[in-house]
Amino acid sequence: MAKNQSNGLGMTPEAMRQLAAKVTDVLVDRIDGLDGANAWDGEFREVLETQLGGPPPEDGRPADDVVDQVVREVLPNAARLDHPRFFGFVPSSPTWPGILADYLASGFNINSCTWLVSSGTSQLELVVVDWLRDWIGYRDGAGGLLTSGGSAASVEALVSAREAANHPDQPVVYMSDQSHSALKRAAYIAGVRREHIRLVQSDRFFRIDMEALRSQVSEDRAKGLYPLAVCANAGSSSTGSIDPLKEIGEFCAEEGMWFHVDAAYGGFALVTPEGKERMDGIASADSVGLDAHKWFFQPYEVGALMVKNAAHLENAFAIGHDVLQDTVWGSNHPNFADRGLQLSRAARALKVWMSVQTFGMTSFREAVQNGLDLARQAEEYVKSNPLLELMTPVALGIVCFRVNPGEGGYDESTLEKINSEVLTRVFWDELAFFSSTSLKGVFSLRLCIINHTSTWDDVRRTLDRVVELGQEALTES
Ligand SMILES: Cc1ncc(COP(=O)(O)O)c(C=O)c1O
């Protein structure tokens, strides 16, 4: 028996190559055929249970069969988030080098926990973190780590804020009514009581109302509570709105509060001059969370938490452990596990680094700009079509609109019915996939246009179809 076949879990080199080649063919065909595929497929539980349920088998079967079944019955039942006409929620379209980076990292069995265990990918993480530092506009002394995504980054940010404030009693966290649920959960996990998570009202452009924020903070101080942090949006998930970052930064400095920016969705717009301008003030934040698996074209999972003062992370998270005593190499050799909540960690920097090395920042910048440009074109389309209504000016790749012929005089509840009917029809029509949101209680259709594979033709065809289906729904209403 060859060494790598020990205990029945190995494969011969020929079998390994053959299986990998098969999987590669499947993936390349899938990606190459995306435009002709549905943007979404799914199946009901009863069907999937019949196909996939059951106890673990005592004896295995040919690996080819297992791959065939997975490719037939499991993986296609999913949103194709990288389809050129997938505009729902927050899409993503990973690059091939990024995908292969995950394969390589798994094959090399990398655990990016400490310098001793993986110095190569720790160095890459330092490099990628430094790129992020530069894009945000942070000075030396800032630092961070790559995370599983925006949710983990938010938890780590608020735990750092709590520790920097010396773990106060009765902390209060402020965010707008547009903030992502991940931020509320993060505050809760960081020890903020649910009733002390303040959802401050937003203005008509869905940006936090500064007056409301100021008066809420002073009211809370008067009650003896501890205003801990403000979480601002730099690209809210509903509309892409950006809170007044400069003003919030100044306010937090005056009040001695931690300033966190949730840029999970919009943060990578920073690589374009336009995005950088719109996010003016972001560098005054104590921490910024941003997701490379959204608008930086990486496979799941990779987000990042950046902090203005790198020491805050280790102050909050580093805990020595006897069994890890050999891993301490000194401050010049950071152990990324000391900066966040995970010990065993995927080598997330590899995909970011490899894809940027392969295509270069000029291409990445153009790809991000493509989303900004297409969203603006979509906004013009909506504004010039008498059947459609723009719900709010486009911000950062998100277009909120609805079917509402101006002269129709439809009331809100009829409009909601018509638009949810349009959404259902789009769904079954299979040309494209997008989703909806609720804008202060008003049902809105929503396109999030950030895939590097999307073209104006994809966006225009989707909007043309909305107009057709909207016309049908109006006629039948
Ligand atoms: C603005 C914003 N914040 C936070 C999150 C949560 O990020 P993740 O899904 O990577 O945990 C999202 C996800 O869409 C988001 O859009």
Image (tube, rainbow, N blue to C red):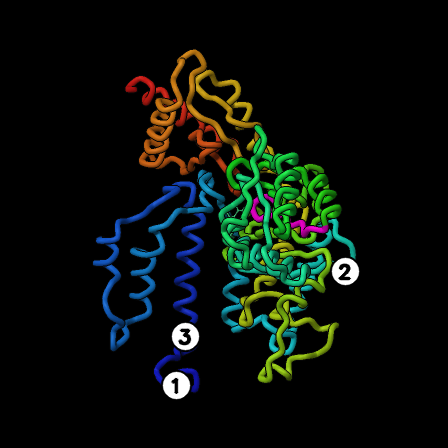
Which sits earlier in the primary sequence, circle 2 or circle 1? 1
At mark 2, the secondary structure is loop
- SS of the residue under disc 3: helix
Q: Amino acid at mark 3?
A: Glu
Q: CA distance from mark 3 to mark 2?
A: 49 Å
- Residue farthest along the front direction in this orientation: 223
Task: Give the residue at mark 1.
Answer: 6
Q: Of callouts 3 and 1, which one flags the residue occurring earlier in the amino acid sequence? A: 1
**Coordinates of residue 77 in the picture (x, y in percent):** 33, 51
Residue 210, percent across and down? 65, 36
Q: Is residue 50 above or below residue 105?
A: above
Q: Could you classify mark 1 by the number of other residues whose Cα lies within 10 Å: few (under 14), some (14-19), or many (20 or more)?
A: few
- At label 1, which amino acid type do we have? Ser
Residue 263 is covered by the magenta coloring? yes
Extreme top residue here? 407
Q: Amino acid at mark 2?
A: Gly
What is the magenta range? 256-266
Please give the label number shown on residue 14. Answer: 3
Q: Position of residue 368 (x, y in %)?
A: 61, 42
Q: Which residue is mark 2?
A: 141
Residue drawn at the location 34% of the way across and 57% of the way down: 71
**Residue behind label 1 places its C-beta within 8 angstroms of ligand 1:** no
Please report whichever mark, 3 or 2, sits nearer to the chain's N-terminal start: 3
